[in-house]
Amino acid sequence: MREITYQEAIREAMSQVMREDERVFILGEDIGVYGGAFGVTRGMIEEFGPERVRNTPISEAAIAGAAIGAALTGMRPIMELQFSDFVTIAMDQLVNQAAKIRYMYGGKASVPMVVRAPGGSGTGAAAQHSQSLEAWLAHVPGLKVVQPANAYDAKGLLKAAIDDNNPVIFYEHKLLYSTKADVPEELYSIPLGKADIKREGSDVTLVSTGIMVQKSLTAADVLAKDGIQVEVIDPRTLVPLDIQTIVDSVKRTGRCVVVYEAVKRGGYGAEIASLVAESEAFDFLDAPIIRLGGKEVPIPQSPELERHAVPQVEDIVEAIRNMMQKA
């Protein structure tokens, strides 16, 4: 199987879907000739033209409003945010319109749109361009939230997101764009709401999202040298969440650690920890559940400070070693 980057997998998914379905189009800032802030749509305007790869004014609220209107009239828009941080400007459209229309119209209208949102730290882009705000969106009934951790998942989950008849927020971590994985050339779909066990283990269940999946797998390799077998679970979609796969794993291992890049306080890891504690897995726990999240600071521009603001491999290793020593 050929190996391509996360960025190429997303572009390929969009291109293949657009060849099959004329209702699908992309809109966003500088996505045409420039190819988008991170080059994900590069070359697409040459194939599909400016009607289906539409440059927009610099107004995320207007882009979201246009996408919602198009979706209501039968199109299937893909909206690109330059940075996920700018979702704050489009929040009224997404939270008060896109998320609620299907419910308020009794199912007679739907909003099949995807919001592609490059997020996360690690590029020195500082506090207004490095946030992880997925928990905000996951809190809103009516929105689905996806966080692919590798190129294979990105292509399959994006196909499923485009096919979905609800608004889907598709979080892409910027540091993953250049990472590679085996990805089939043909178009395929990964169901939303199906977690993936990225690595099997018997001592600790490590639930991680987005870029933290890669760090968790590295940490698991380190811990294996100590004889600690870590099971790494990637939910892949925060909404809907496949909690049963996580619960079943915790029942086998007796321990649970949740790792995410967003600020720890009020983060999505708290939701996972609570769901595990409320489930039948509670009686199998040999140690309190641990959450590792970002520090309660705006993301710094300084590379060293930025690194300390979010969990790193050594933080995961230390947390699990401490948990095992106390058990």
Image (spheres, rainbow, N blue to C red):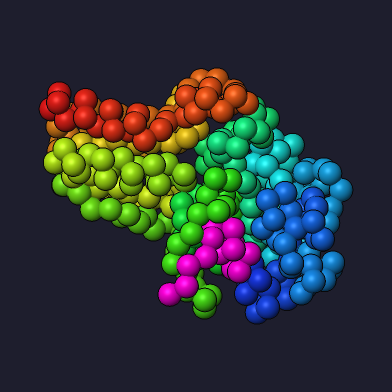
- Magenta stretch encompasses residue 306: no
Residue 261 visible, this orientation: yes
Q: Nearer the viewer, residue 183 or 72?
A: 183
Residue 226: x percent and y percent? 16, 38
Q: Residue at coordinates 47% horizontally, 46% vertically from top-left?
A: 210
Residue located at (52% from left, 37% from top): 135
Residue 44 placement (x, y as % from top left): 74, 68
The number of discs equals 0
Q: Nearer the viewer, residue 72 or 204?
A: 204
Quadrant of the image occupied by residue 275: top left
Residue 250 higher or lower than 36, as above or below: above
Residue at (31%, 40%) from the top-left corner?
Answer: 219
Q: Which range of residues does the magenta coloring cover?
A: 1-13
Apparent side of residue 226 relative to residue 91 in the rendered image (left or right): left
- Residue 69 image position (x, y, % from top left): 78, 57
- In the shown orientation, is residue 27 left or right of residue 154? right
Is 3 covered by the magenta stretch? yes
Residue 99 visible in rendering: no
Foreground of the two, 137 or 261: 261
From the image, give the main secondary structure of the stretch colored magenta: helix
Residue at 82% across, 46% down: 62
Q: Residue 190: which quarter of the image?
A: bottom left
Q: Residue 11 vs residue 141: left or right?
A: right
Quadrant placement of the N terminus: bottom left
Instruction: Report x, y in % for residue 85.
Output: 66, 36
Please state which of residues 261 and 104 is positioned toward the viewer in this rendering: 261
Q: Is residue 266 above or below residue 34?
A: above
- Quadrant where the image shows the C terminus: top left
